[in-house]
Amino acid sequence: MGTEEVIAVDRFADIQVLRYEVPGFDCLTLRQKRLVYYLSEAALWGRDILFDQNGSYNLRIRRLLEAVLPYVPQEADEAERQALLTYLKRVWFSNGIHHHYSCDKLAPGCSEEFLRRCVLATPTAELPLVEGEDVEAMCARLFPVIFRPEVLPKRVNQEDGQDLVATSAANYYEGVTQQEAEDFYARLKDNGNPDRPVMYGLNSRLVKQDGVVKEQVWKIGGMYGPALERIVGWLEKAEEVAENDAQREVIRLLVDFYRTGDLQVFDDYSIAWLRDTESRVDFVNGFIETYGDPLGLKASWESIVNFKDLEATHRTETISENAQWFEDHSPVDVRFKKPHVKGVSAKVITAAMLAGDLYPSTAIGINLPNSNWIRSVHGSKSVTIGNLTTAYGRAARGNGFREEFIADAAELERVNRYADITDDLHTDLHECLGHGSGQLLPGVDPDALKAYGATIEEARADLFGLYYLPDERLVELGLTPDSEAYKAAYYTYMMNGLMTQLVRIEPGCTVEEAHMRNRQLIARWALEQGREEGTVELERRDGKTYVRIHDYVRLRALFARLLAEVQRIKSEGDYEAARRLVEDYGVQVDPQLHAEVLERYRRLDLAPYKGFVNPRYRPVFDEQERLVDVKLDATESFTEQMLRYSRDYSCL
């Protein structure tokens, strides 16, 4: 059995679902295993929060589809049956009815008439009816949302010139305009503590009721209270088996935050979390990233439970120990550099459980906290998720992708030789140093770049990593094997930013997701600047387009120039410069090149998106009902896991 067969679990639409291994779990102590188990249970109870955040109809539509699945009429057309199942799988994977990456609404595939027949064949008690509603009323309310493309077409709209709040389906605002939301939070900032500015809006929904704009806070006793109560219950069990006092304090503060909704408590928790560098087991649990909010203020719920990969962490520790050197030698203006880099820690982790906005699709690296003042005063903690990068790497080997898109045999040999090393290293540099580098000028609002802030921040971190990959310092530190290795990362980055990431975009659409905009921005800017001087070009050969890099040294100089400008934009809060840079280079797509890339990729029969199923942790009890072991079960299918989660971890 090949590697691809071992880790592949499911394939549907544009998605391949993989299974990740959890090496080293059996070597943890019983206390650590119990901690992983309790934190994993806390993670799973947040699933419904994300579904609701992604759209107000998501939970009812998911429950409707799950309810009718066992009652599809036997005589039903097989194509319609499969289309319904595929649609449900896509809703599961995207945590809602909009694509997890493009944010476009998912097309059901099956007909409205077919779904209605399935609904009528389902016992009424199984359907997600609200009080006073009959089946026809439910269908009248939900079917237009499911089947009509013009109803709630985008989860997150980033189109320049539009009211991004009014045109986004994400459930973070109700009855307010973009201007009203921006004005509301501007007033809060004006009255806040300038030395310790909390991230206003992070854990709330903004609504207008009786003409008054106000927040619905996500806390116990408030919005999402039932789910947060269950999360807290498992966190309190985890506190009992915490590895040390520092970790106990982290958990205590997080529980306090969920009980109060107080953002100052969240900052206290964040500081305690980044200072806990001694615990083997670690976790993220909460309202963290703001990519799902068109204004970049409100955070989606996510969780990851993990433990340190002791051997691989040597690489990231070497980087973090030299953080000041990298900051000092960055090509940005000295005004924007940190004179004293504080609290930078980094490690390679083994993911043990993924949840919320990190599941099924997930990041491969994390740098937190996101608060600018905490980063400046206390530092940050970075992780690279080693077992997930390994799973992705195994799935990519031998599938023909590199052979199709890399220009020649010499480049292909270099990529095959070095890409695994340099990709992991670029992730480390991005998370540990890139996000942690630089500083805002005094008085600059961390949210000054508004809708463009996420793209600029990701570009800043990517460019920091790209600039340093060729540096001889990395060879001296033993992080790269030689002075040629970086070229593999440069080539694949330019190829991805200019061409191959386009397989994730439908014909006629623009680039909208922040990470994709960032990569295209960097690659297209470098192409434009480097074409005239012969640094890099897109060449045509035998009817196909390839990236050709003629001078890697000059390409590094281009990355340095762009890094300096992106850092200036960030440090000065130059909104107009951010808007121009993103709109000019990161958004538009060449339709001819796009069509070519899609056709070449189609012939490879690959899925452009990948995600994971989780392992299941089963507690083992003795005759006195004491927990004496935790066993890892890695046999569940994607559908089995999704149905179990909906059955066992749903309370909203």
Image: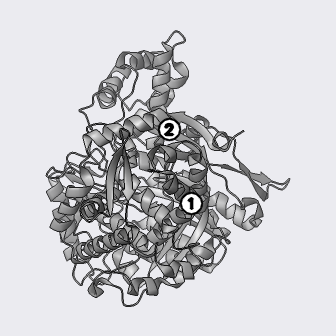
Relative to residue 21, is residue 6 depicted above or below? Answer: above
Q: Residue furthest top?
A: 75
Residue sitting nearer the eye, 118 or 499:
499
- Residue at (32%, 64%) from the top-left corner? 535
Q: State the count of labels.
A: 2
Q: Would you identify the image quadrant in which residue 542 lies? A: top left
Quadrant in which the C terminus appears: top left
Relative to residue 426, is residue 392 depicted above or below? Answer: above
- Residue at (48%, 29%) from the top-left corner? 86
> In the image, what residue type sits under mark 2?
Leu
- Residue at (28%, 74%) from the top-left corner? 561
Q: Residue furthest right?
A: 623
Relative to residue 92, is residue 66 depicted above or below? Answer: above
- Can you see residue 297? no
Q: Position of residue 6 (x, y in %)?
A: 68, 42
Relative to residue 107, is residue 203 depicted above or below? Answer: below
The residue that label 2 is drawn on is 606
Asked whether, in this view, residue 461 is left or right of residue 76, the answer is left
Q: Earlier in the sequence, mark 2 or mark 1?
A: 1
Asked whether, in this view, residue 303 is left or right of residue 281, the answer is left
The residue that label 1 is drawn on is 420
Kindly state the secondary structure of the residue where label 2 is placed. loop
Q: Residue furthest bottom?
A: 339
Q: Position of residue 439 (x, y in %)?
A: 32, 81
What is the CA distance from the residue labelled 2 to the residue labelled 1? 20 Å
Asked whether, in this view, residue 612 is left or right of residue 92, the answer is right
- Residue at (28%, 80%) from the top-left corner? 440
Kindly state the secondary structure of the residue where label 1 is placed. helix
- Can you see residue 24? yes
Q: Position of residue 522 (x, y in %)?
A: 31, 62
Q: Position of residue 93 (x, y in %)?
A: 48, 41
